Image: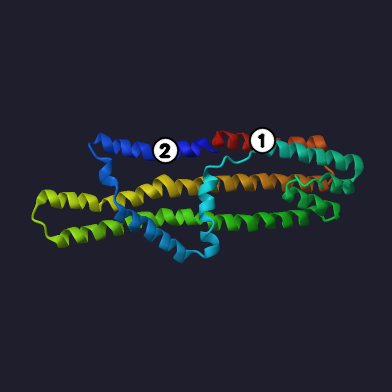
Amino acid sequence: MDLLSVIGLIAGVGFVLYGYIMEGGSLASLGMLSSTFIVFGGSFGALCLSYGMKQVKKLPILFIEIFKEPKVTISETIDFLVRLSQTAKENGLLSLEKAVSDGNVDPFIKRGILSVVDGTDAEKISEIMQNDIYVYEQDRILSISMLDALGGYTPAFGMVGTIVGMIHTLSAGSSDAAQLTQAISIAFTATLYGVAAANLIFIPMATKLKNRLADYRLEKEMIINAVCSIRNGINPKMLKEQLSSYLILGSKSAKRSS
């Protein structure tokens, strides 16, 4: 589990509520079912209108992913690529087919190495593997954009809820100032829900997933670099030195997940 995500969510919501209580507010006054329906129901409806069923079904998976600690395998991947380079140097490129026959090998690495075994030139291998990255990225970007969309919808529907509340309050025509003030404060609860949901949940989640996607691209770029170098007969020691800079990615990811 990604504890930092859990801590961030709890801290964000907790400090907002604590600040509200410090000002003399009552948590019970924030529990407005009508505001919940307007803000979250309206936002979900807008999301369904904006995206297809294929994408909307992925939304619960995105929420789960936020709290999963990403696996950091940069160091292990580098070691494996260097071993492949050593195998190719000692036994030739054809020997690599057996080296990647294990079912636990990253399919992306396996695809690249099998292209090497087939005699495909390095430029074409890079083109094929870059295309794989592009297709995956486009699907992920589309999925993550749903969180960005919700980050825009919820404040807007918060305003809708407030306007609806104000219309109801003013149309009642109460002459009691205290009662009128209380009704107006309740109306603004919807705006609070919308702004808080956008800035404490949806936008931060989208940002985290975008960062992880950037890490994914960098790792795959490293693999493409290594596969093409192996195709060109690079010395294993030189390859290890060449890939060592990518270890920074592994350390940064580990810190972000701890």
Q: Image check: 98 left or right of 148?
A: right
19 horizontally vs 226: left or right? left
- According to the image, label 2 marks what residue? 10
Name the residue: 50% across, 56% down: 145
Q: Amino acid at mark 2?
A: Ile
Disc sitting over residue 247 in the figure: 1
Compared with 10, 213 (above or below) is below
Question: Quarter holding the C terminus?
Answer: top right
Across and down, in percent, residue 80 comes to 77, 39
Residue 172's mark?
Answer: none
Q: Point out the tag, 1 or 2, that comes first from the N-terminus.
A: 2
Q: Position of residue 95 (x, y in %)?
A: 89, 46
To which quarter of the image does residue 88 belong?
top right
| Eye-nearest disc, 1 or 2 | 2
- Find the distance from the CA under tag 1 to the CA under tag 2: 31 Å
Query: How is the model colour-coded?
Result: rainbow
Query: Dot 2 surroundings within 10 Å: few (below 14), some, or many (20 or more)?
Result: few
Q: Quadrant of residue 24?
A: top left
Q: Residues within 10 Å of mark 1 (few under 14, many from 20)?
A: some
Q: Is residue 220 above or below residue 170?
A: above
Residue 119, image x, y percentages: 86, 55
Q: Amino acid at mark 1?
A: Leu
Q: Residue furthest right?
A: 91
Q: Residue at x 42, y 38 (%)?
A: 10
Q: Residue at x 40, y 55 (%)?
A: 152
Q: Is 6 above or below relative to 125?
A: above
Who is closer to the viewer here, 67 or 99? 67
Q: Position of residue 143 (x, y in %)?
A: 54, 56
Q: Label 2: state its secondary structure.
A: helix
